[in-house]
Amino acid sequence: MNRYPLWKYAIMIVALAIGLLYTVPNFFPQVPAVQVSTNKAAVKLDNALLGRVESTLKDAGVPIGYSALDANGVHIRFQGGDTVTQLKAKEALLKALNNGVADGTGNYIIALTNESTVPKWMQSMNALPMFLGLDLRGGVHFLMQVDMKGALDRAAERNMSDVRSLLREKKVSYGGVSKAGDTLVVRFTDAGERDKAQQAIAAANNDLAIREDGAAPELRLVLTIKEEAKRKLADSAIEQNQKVLNNRINALGLTEPIIQRQGADRIVIQVPGASDPARLKDVIGRTGTLEFRHVEAHGGKNASTLEAAKNGNVPFGMELLVDRTGEQIVVRKQPIITGERISSAEPAFDSQNNQPIVRVSTDSQGARVLREHTSQNVKERMAIVLIEKGKAEVITAPTTQSELGAQFQISGSMTVRETSDIALLIRSGSIAAPMEIIEERTVGPSLGAENIDRGFNSVKWGFVALSIFIIAYYMVMGLVSALALAINVLLLIAILSMLQATLTLPGIAAIALTLGMAIDANVLINERIREELRNGAKPQDAIAAGFDRAWATILDSNITTLIAGIALFAFGTGPVKGFAVVHCLGILTSMFSAVFFARGVVNLIYGARKKLEKISIGTVWRPDSVVTKPAAADAN
């Protein structure tokens, strides 16, 4: 009756082993470290770089405790690591690798970070500690307001330019185009010309709602952006700005930034470990631009012009730049199109030869300009240039193989990583809508450490108090309940670590709440067993009935609580979502530990005995105990 098959005990053992494996890394301390990486495909991360980093730090008198190279770059930890040594190492590496440049435009990104001392064999199994949130680790918090009106104004400006070019192309006679907010008004004197313009505009741009207005001789077309297009534009602007911000913060050398959308027009930026909000404000406030420019001279064309430019004699209206492979080229300063005309850029594979490519899409105006330029410059090179803080960087300079339109691809000898990088830079070259900081908060590392101590103590003492009470009240069965409670916490932390979740104060609160809720299931089971014993059931029958009959109540109560947790996740934001995730996972692990695991342990203790006289579950009072005999006679 109270015997588990071997496969159930096997599940218990595997769950316990996995729980220990993925929970233990959270107890290894984190130490200050430096990570050397790059966002430039032409720069190699190899053993030569590792040796260069090690020799640089040795010459600077920085004691290295650990060094390693992986796909993300070079990782350095220090003997008796502290923040002073960390900063000294960063300065030495900036000077040696980037010539002192620290604004993200150098070849390497020197990132200050904290690295866990988890053994390599654990890391190879992806057994890593949870990330710590801003409130536990310290750092900088910004709330950005995206100016959607500005985004609509930009869209209206582009539409006005598109309409003018389209009407000239279609040879439509019109009196002029004016803009009021995001509404365009096109004036005509002839109804036939207005009808012709209306057909051309409707065919060229599906995002515009067109309405006729006025009477002869003052005829008008009123063009407004459709509501669906406005929502699409807002979503695209938020997504584009998020990508730009993420790219810029990573380039600054800060790891683990959290950049999330909040509501319809806000972006939350949290950078754990950052301590310089002024510098971050400067970075996220940049307005970088992306430009497509014609390549005038390179190694295979106009070599004399290139040599003259290298010697300082750059022709008027030209600029000497260096692409990502290190090749010097001369490009025209006047752009063909700018990044505002780029709709999307995604890495992909060529369907004919399965080679990595980048697919780029432009708006209608960009497509017309590109078509005009490339039709006259087939087999010529065109540079994609990113400009930030007055510095121009050539992302790539491919050869135009044919006339380009609204959609084209960039191909060549590129790896999958290079296509991803190029697509990201094209997409994130400039922000899609203006932003401003409406909230700024800095959390110090000492406050974060205090929060960790208090949170850990709340969970620890809550567990101790519950365990003492449950053991005192239910004896051996209470000890089993306390063990199930410990397994519950173990599995919960293991799952959060496996998911690489970010632990915050609300998350710790959810863990503490899970303890109180999880013990409720054990109380239901133990009280049900007591009730069966009071009714005269044999101990083995009471155990089986207690677990079986309490299960329906446990399931109902946990499902209703789970629904509340799902609602918190669905409608909450930020910390509320984090609380909801831990809360829901805690419900699932508590059901497993309180029912499946606890019953397995009880079966080990009592199930092997065929004739069980009593179980240790505290005092059981029968209804007739006061009349027939002293209560002590029926007590366990």
Image (cartoon, rainbow, N blue to C red):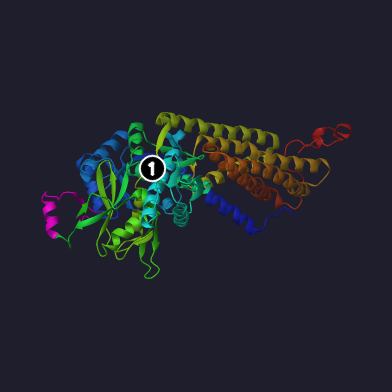
Q: Would residue 46 be found to the left or right of residue 141 on screen?
A: left
Which residue appears farthest toward the front when viewing the image? 217
Q: Would residue 311 be found to the left or right of residue 178 on screen?
A: left
Q: Position of residue 318 (x, y in %)?
A: 19, 50
Q: Position of residue 381 (x, y in %)?
A: 25, 60
318 is within the stretch colored magenta: yes
Give the vertical position of 145 relative to 543 (above or below): above
* Residue hosting label 1: 245
- The quadrant in which the C terminus is found is top right
Q: Position of residue 354 (x, y in %)?
A: 38, 68
Foreground: 142 or 371?
A: 371
Residue type, numbered disc 1: Leu
620 is within the stretch colored magenta: no
Q: Residue at x 28, y 45 (%)?
A: 387
The picture quadrant where one finds residue 169 is: bottom left
The picture quadrant where one finds residue 460 is: top right
Q: Position of residue 33 (x, y in %)?
A: 33, 41
Q: Would residue 77 be found to the left or right of residue 436 on screen?
A: left
For the question of whether residue 413 can be seen, the reply is: yes
Secondary structure found at label 1: helix
- The quadrant in which the N terminus is found is bottom right
Q: Residues within 10 Å of mark 1 (few under 14, many from 20)?
A: many
Q: Residue at x 43, y 46 (%)?
A: 187
Q: Residue at x 59, y 33 (%)?
A: 462
Q: State the extent of the magenta-drawn residues as a range.
A: 303-328
Which residue appears farthest toward the bottom when viewing the image? 352
